[in-house]
Amino acid sequence: MSTYSLSDGLASGAPRTSRVPLLANWIRESGAGVLASVAWIALGLSCLWWQDVGDWSRTHSLGIAAFIIAALALFGTVGADYLGAAGQALHKRAPWLVALGVFLTVWEVATAKFAWLPLPFFPPPQAIIEVYTDDLPKLLDSVLASIKLQLGGYLIGATIGFLTGVSIGWSRAVGYWVHPVLRFIGPLPATAWLPIAFFTFPSSWSASTFLIALATGFPVTVLTWSGVASVSNAYYDVARTLGAKPSFLVLKVAIPAALPHVFVGLFMGLGSSFAVLVVAEMIGVKAGLGWYLQWAQGWAAYANMYAALIVMSLLCSGAITLLFAIRDRLLVWQKGTVKW
Amino acid sequence: MVATALAEAVTHPATGAALDIEQVSHAFDIDGTELPVLSDVSISVEPGEFVALLGPSGCGKSTLLRLIAGLDKPKAGRLREDEERIRNPHPSRVVVFQDPTLFPWRSVWDNVALGLEAQGILRSQRQRVDDALDLVGLSPFRDAYPHQLSGGMAQRVALARALVNDPKILILDEPLGKLDSLTRITMQAELVALWQRKGFTTLLVTHDAEEALVLANRVIVFSDRPARVKADIRVDRPYPRHRGDPYLAELRRQILGLLGLDATW
Ligand SMILES: Nc1ncnc2c1ncn2[C@@H]1O[C@H](COP(=O)(O)OP(=O)(O)OP(=O)(O)O)[C@@H](O)[C@H]1O
Ligand SMILES: [Mg+2]
């Protein structure tokens, strides 16, 4: 079988490869990039061709931007060989660029041009761009406020959770006292504390920090604890015969061995603390993206809501990416870890 | 008599420690019932001796090694290193466990450095880690992680991790069991050379009578569980020993007989 196809390829395959596969190759290499260019040209045309049904100031700019992206996609594809890594990156993402262009075109046409979707609730892309250009200072302030609150609460919660988890996992006495408290309070959603927290804490900011720390701390504690508790005794035996003291056993054996579990806890804590952050901002803190969403809803500023949602999702995704990067760095020794 | 035998076998003055196992018995609790594992075991090991421990699987050899290491306390009897009671683990008695148990989060080099780091002397003694890696032929893999090693390589790292501490008593629990026969023979020769050079006392658990006879000055055969000392055989042969040596072949036949295999072997 293998010898047959080998001789076949030697005899007649060589001349055939020169014509038809060349076109097929070109389509495989550049097809997606060219299609992406076409999709973005379609977006540009759809912006400029028809009249807007409403009054938006960035329609023209959006159209121009779409043409620029289309041009970049085209040149990037044609000149991929000269662009090195950038060309490679474009080639890899070209199918997504097509999808994005098509989606934006449909969105543009369905909202700004023919209003197939009911209008105040579904603003067109240019309305959202308008928010980013015209309401930037307020949005930036909100982003900074959110990051500050989230980062503070998360770091406090993760640190306390980690230390508590290690202590419970290591010391029977600590476990005796902390475990029941953890079982009683931990499963309660942190948001249930909101009303109490906001009048017992001196400021809404400290109350929110506490709640975020609580939401982070519980999963981090439980998973650190289970990680430390599941470390194989064989590791301790090896370390002890080599002269390790208890501090070495904790710092150099228990903690590194438990680290994969700790990261699972950190991921879970991050997810639940996002939820608390948004609710806390909506209800108590007069700043941040949650508050911005609330405020936009009050003014029926739907474009602002979408704009804030997009920023929020980028921030959350960015935080997860960062945590993954830290994990990959610390856990290089693990094989087959999930790539985010 | 022991002293003369040793003088022939060990060319250098021994820096190893003496080990006294006095009427040691041990048992495990399994669901409330007591499982006797060691029954009145007494062995006296001279400094620098190479003792092989042979016995059926599950008879209690690894358990005895854990007691010697100081990881567990015997139910009865006493263990002493150079006249001092063994109560806790100490880096003068290093164990190479049956399973290599490398720390997966540490590179090969960092695994070997474990003992020096735990004793707080790594900073000034980094060369010793490099030397130990050289000795087991794994210098090119110093930055690899354990999951990137073969079973035999992992076992060699475990050996290097023990040797780097310059132990007075080296305790080996079937350390060569996972190696292919070629590497195994090489490692056996290395082990003898090392032991002759450094003079540490060696206890080697093995299930291979031939390995025991090629390596040790003394072979102790255990009974089935609970382990008792069934025979204590002196091997008065100079090193390097040859596998085909008729004297060793006769001893091997005897030992296999003690382990329950009849003379046809
Ligand atoms: N931690 C433990 N708890 C309960 N029983 C144990 C424990 N460790 C060992 N045993 C039992 O003690 C007996 C002896 O075990 P040990 O590991 O010492 O055998 P071994 O002679 O080393 O066998 P092998 O040659 O197969 O390694 C076995 O029956 C085992 O079930
Ligand atoms: Mg064993």
Image (spheres, coloured by chain):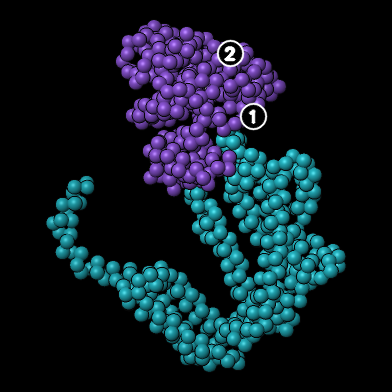
Chain colours: A cyan, B purple
Q: Is residue B206 visible?
A: no
Element at label 2: strand
Check mark 2 vs ligand 1: CB closer than 8 Å? yes or no.
Answer: no
Instruction: Answer with the quarter of the image where residue A297 lies.
Output: bottom right
Q: Nearer the viewer, residue B53 or A169?
A: B53
Residue drawn at x 40%, y 78% as measured from the top left: A73
Inspect the image, locate mark 1, and give the three-letter code of the amino acid beneath it: Asn
Rendered view: A293 above or below B180? below
Q: Is residue B189 visible?
A: yes
Q: Nearer the viewer, residue A25 or A225?
A: A225
Provide residue A36's location: percent of width, then percent of height. 41, 76
Mark 1 is surrounded, within 10 Å at the Cα level, by few (under 14), some (14 to 19) or many (20 or more) other residues, namely: some
Rendered view: B137 above or below A104? above
Q: Are marks 1 and 2 in contact (CB under 8 Å)?
A: no
Gap between marks 1 and 2 measured at Cα: 20 Å
The residue that label 1 is drawn on is: B88
- Horizontal placement of B7 versus A121: left or right? left
Provide residue A7's location: percent of width, then percent of height. 16, 52
* Residue situated furthest right in the rendering: A199
Residue drawn at x 42%, y 23% as measured from the top left: B12
Which part of the image, by quadrant, shows the C terminus of chain B? top left
Task: Specify the subunit that label 1 lies on.
Answer: B
* Residue situated furthest front in the rendering: B13
Provide residue A292's location: percent of width, then percent of height. 70, 78
- Residue B42, numbered label: 2
Q: Nearer the viewer, residue B76 or A311?
A: B76
Task: Specify the subunit that label 2 lies on.
Answer: B
* Residue situated furthest left in the rendering: A11
Inspect the image, locate mark 2, and give the three-letter code of the amino acid beneath it: Ser
Residue drawn at x 55%, y 20% as measured from the top left: B18
Element at label 1: loop
